[in-house]
Image: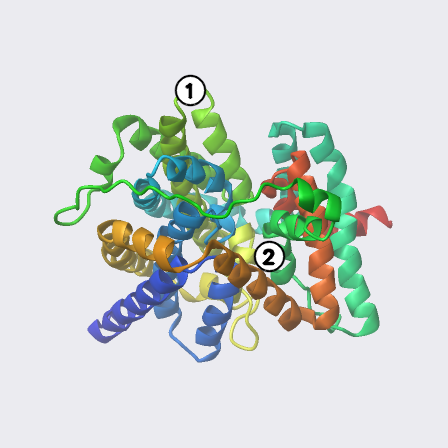
């Protein structure tokens, strides 16, 4: 491999790490919304495939490292994947440990990366002989994932019954848009629906504010007292294995391995399932929250990395929620990439390894260092100068803007409808994971109902 090509890969990885370190700190920057457009632009610009992969791996790792910050300091998901961590992060924030929360999540994310890169590459190599079979049954696998996650949830019967009606809502809106010409029939509205589910609880609460009786019953606060315990500064390059205790390291490592082997499942669903399972017996709220967020962030990073690498290497088709969302341009971006001509066909196994390792090392070196060294300063700045309501407004405004970009004005109301239903289901106990898997399986499931 030529030195000039390696140099390009390093530069692209640095660009991805810096860009998505900044983007990840902002609240509500959904992975699909911020990664898919940039990746698509780079694909269409003619960037070398191996350079493109280095950029993408660095970007996704950097994004996952920094989206812990808005969760820890404001309780707002930095992206879809960080939504399950909000409850536990708020426990630590309540005790003045928001900056500790950031460090725990970032360290779990690094452990997930360290474990997932070699294991994902190894598993992908094993699955190459059956890649075509997996691609042929992708929709059925997504539906199976929805059923599995529903059965694992507390309100399992409600979750199971909601699968078909929610799929009908999603696919019904798509057919409405096609029928009235809001979007061409070969365009599948996805990103804004994805975000509508993410922001569902917020949309539901905003609508409740319009109800006078509910509004009068809501608690009112005129001034929030926030205590932020000062932590000792970290000297040198932070070591994730020292920041987490032994039990947190073990649970994060185990969760990462399970997240890799369930790459075809919703990362959100597996994050919720594994995070709650691994911490269910811990009674101390601070210890439970610390163990949960470190394990959850480890799962998210491992799931995202495996969800990109395994379909790219072994299948050549987007057989994972990650591949269908942020990584879709790596599989299908006409006229550059299509189902028969994408990174799967263009890169060798050695090239996949080199690009992935370069992207991962650079992202950890830049983003993890910044996140860990300046967590205290970041928290202090946001608490002092950025209102919580402003962060919510940014998140909500982003969703509405993307809804309009996807399918015009009508889709704004469509996303509000999906958000209301998703918010009600979430409140009733149907977790994000089930809802996201329904989103992926909806086209095939609905087509089977009309046969």
Mark 2, residues whose alpha carbon is within 10 Å: few (<14), some, or many (≥20)? many
Q: Position of residue 30 (x, y in %)?
A: 51, 58
Q: Is residue 189 left or right of residue 71?
A: right
Q: Is residue 410 above or below residue 352?
A: below
Identify the disc placed on residue 283: 1
Is 438 in front, or is 131? 438
Is 438 in front, or is 374? 374
Scheme of colours in the image: rainbow
Q: Position of residue 442 (x, y in %)?
A: 72, 50
1 and 2 marks in contact (CB < 8 Å):
no
Secondary structure under tag 1 reads loop
Front of the two marks 1 and 2? 1
Q: How far separated are the C-alphas under marks 1 and 2?
A: 33 Å
Q: Is residue 165 left or right of residue 64?
A: right
Identify the disc placed on residue 363: none
Q: Earlier in the sequence, mark 1 or mark 2?
A: 2
Secondary structure under tag 2 reads helix
Mark 1, residues whose alpha carbon is within 10 Å: few (<14), some, or many (≥20)? few
Q: Is residue 387 left or right of residue 369?
A: right
Q: Is residue 347 above or below residue 431?
A: below
Identify the disc placed on residue 195: 2
Q: In the rendered image, which quarter is residue 317 located in? A: bottom right
Q: Position of residue 95 (x, y in %)?
A: 36, 34
Q: In the rendered image, which quarter is residue 119 located in? A: top left
Q: Position of residue 75 (x, y in %)?
A: 47, 46
Q: Is residue 258 left or right of residue 54?
A: right
Q: Residue at x 37, y 60 (%)?
A: 385
């Amino acid at each position: 491999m030529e030195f000039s090509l390696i140099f390009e890969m390093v530069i692209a990885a640095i660009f991805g790490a810096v860009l998505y370190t900044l983007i990840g700190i902002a609240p509500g920057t959904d992975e699909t919304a911020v990664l898919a457009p940039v990746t698509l632009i780079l694909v269409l610009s003619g960037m070398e495939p191996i350079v493109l992969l280095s950029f993408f791996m660095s970007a996704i790792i950097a994004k996952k490292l920094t989206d812990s910050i808005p969760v820890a300091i404001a309780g707002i998901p930095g992206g879809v994947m960080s939504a399950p961590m909000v409850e536990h992060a708020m426990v630590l924030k309540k005790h003045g440990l928001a900056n500790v929360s950031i460090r725990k999540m970032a360290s779990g994310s690094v452990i997930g990366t360290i474990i997932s890169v070699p294991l994902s590459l190894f598993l992908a190599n094993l699955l190459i002989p059956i890649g075509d079979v997996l691609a042929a049954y992708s929709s059925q696998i997504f539906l199976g994932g929805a059923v599995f996650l529903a059965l694992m949830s507390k309100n399992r019967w409600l979750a199971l019954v909601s699968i078909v009606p929610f799929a009908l809502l999603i696919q019904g809106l798509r057919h409405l848009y096609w029928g009235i010409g809001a979007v061409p029939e070969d365009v599948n509205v996805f990103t804004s629906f994805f975000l509508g589910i993410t922001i569902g609880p917020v949309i539901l609460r905003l609508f409740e504010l319009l109800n006078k009786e509910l509004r009068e019953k809501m608690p009112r606060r005129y001034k929030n007292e926030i205590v932020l315990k000062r932590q000792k500064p970290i000297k040198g390059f932070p070591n994730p294995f020292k920041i987490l205790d032994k039990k947190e390291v073990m649970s994060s490592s185990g969760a990462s391995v399970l997240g890799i082997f369930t790459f075809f499942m919703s990362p959100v669903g597996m994050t919720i399932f594994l995070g709650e399972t691994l911490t269910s017996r811990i009674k101390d709220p601070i210890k439970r929250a610390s163990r949960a967020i470190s394990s959850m962030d480890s799962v998210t990073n491992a799931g995202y990395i495996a969800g990109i690498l395994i379909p790219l290497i072994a299948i050549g088709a987007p057989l994972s929620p990650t591949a269908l969302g942020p990584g879709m341009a790596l599989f299908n971006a006409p006229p550059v990439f299509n189902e028969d001509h994408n990174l799967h066909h263009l890169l060798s196994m050695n090239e996949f390894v080199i690009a992935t390792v370069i992207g991962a090392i650079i992202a950890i070196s830049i983003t993890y260092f910044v996140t860990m060294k300046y967590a205290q300063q970041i928290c202090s700045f946001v608490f002092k100068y950025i209102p919580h309501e402003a962060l919510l407004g940014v998140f909500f405004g982003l969703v509405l803007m993307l809804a309009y970009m996807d399918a015009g004005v009508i889709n704004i109301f469509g996303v509000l409808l999906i958000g209301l239903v998703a918010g009600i289901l979430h409140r009733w106990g149907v977790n994000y994971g089930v809802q996201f898997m329904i989103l992926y399986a909806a086209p095939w499931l609905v087509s089977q109902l009309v046969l």
